[in-house]
Amino acid sequence: GENVEQHPSTLSVQEGDSAVIKCTYSDSASNYFPWYKQELGKRPQLIIDIRSNVGEKKDQRIAVTLNKTAKHFSLHITETQPEDSAVYFCAASMDKVIFGPGTSLSVIP
Amino acid sequence: EAGVAQSPRYKIIEKRQSVAFWCNPISGHATLYWYQQILGQGPKLLIQFQNNGVVDDSQLPKDRFSAERLKGVDSTLKIQPAKLEDSAVYLCASSLGLADYEQYFGPGTRLTVT
């Protein structure tokens, strides 16, 4: 079945710097790749998603890139702010969604 | 619109006891998911419903876990008997359709098994 790996597991950046989180997936049939943000004690919330027919998508300070050949996709956050501190989960989906293990991002003021 | 509702929010039980969780998805959402999230890990899909039919339950420990979706709306997840390793947050989510739609998560039920 599908397996999703995510790196790094923890990431610490200075406020204003960029953060990059990378994920790889195993099932080449996966066609939908969402990213969720989970703040401490709260529910996961979708922040951006990309479908397999698109290579890149951007929404303000957040962007996602997809390389289907290499089966990896990445989340890019620019101009990080303290409120970006959270756990970020990537996921890959064809008929069901498989989540990665998460990246704990800390933005230091 | 109202979000996904779950109850109870917290539950503490002893091992070998039984427990049930309830979820009410967003109105009109055909797909409902139950996830188990152990502290420090990503959500693990337990079961996925499309209306009142099961789409995937490959990771549901069927010897102790069961789930149903009544009339294609509300859903219950039951554990009987509970084990210590079942301690986790149980998240319910719903979406308009299968897999490639945004999932909306409920607040979760934090289960502690002692």
Image (cartoon, rainbow, N blue to C red):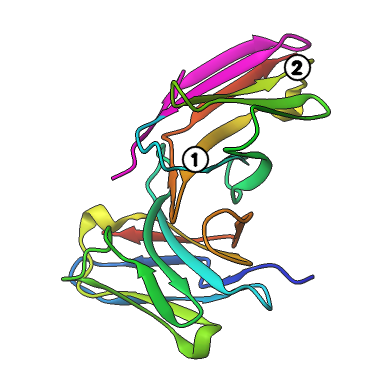
What residue did someone put label 1 on? Answer: A91
Q: Kindly identify the residue that appears in the image at 47 percent across and 41 percent down.
A: A92
User: Is residue B111 positioned above or below A70 on the image?
Assistant: below
Quadrant for the N terminus of chain B in the image: bottom right
User: Is residue B35 positioned above or below A6 on the image?
Assistant: below
Outermost bottom residue = B71
Helix, strand or loop at label 1? It is: strand
Residue type highlighted by circle 2: Thr
- The image shows residue B78 at horizontal and vertical percentages of 33, 76
- The image shows residue A35 at horizontal and vertical percentages of 59, 38
- The image shows residue B67 at horizontal and vertical percentages of 35, 77
Instruction: Indicate which label's residue lies in the foreground, 1 or 2.
Output: 1
What residue did someone put label 2 on? Answer: A78
* Left or right position of A74 against B52: right
Q: Indicate the quadrant where residue B11 lies.
A: bottom left
Residue range of the region highlighted in magenta in the rendering: A1-24
Mark 2 surroundings: few (<14), some (14-19) or many (≥20) residues within 10 A: some
- The image shows residue A67 at horizontal and vertical percentages of 53, 23
Q: Kindly identify the residue that appears in the image at 52 percent across and 56 percent down.
A: B99
* Left or right position of B87 against A17: left
Q: Chain of mark 2?
A: A
Q: Is residue A6 magenta-colored?
A: yes
Quadrant for the C terminus of chain B in the image: bottom left
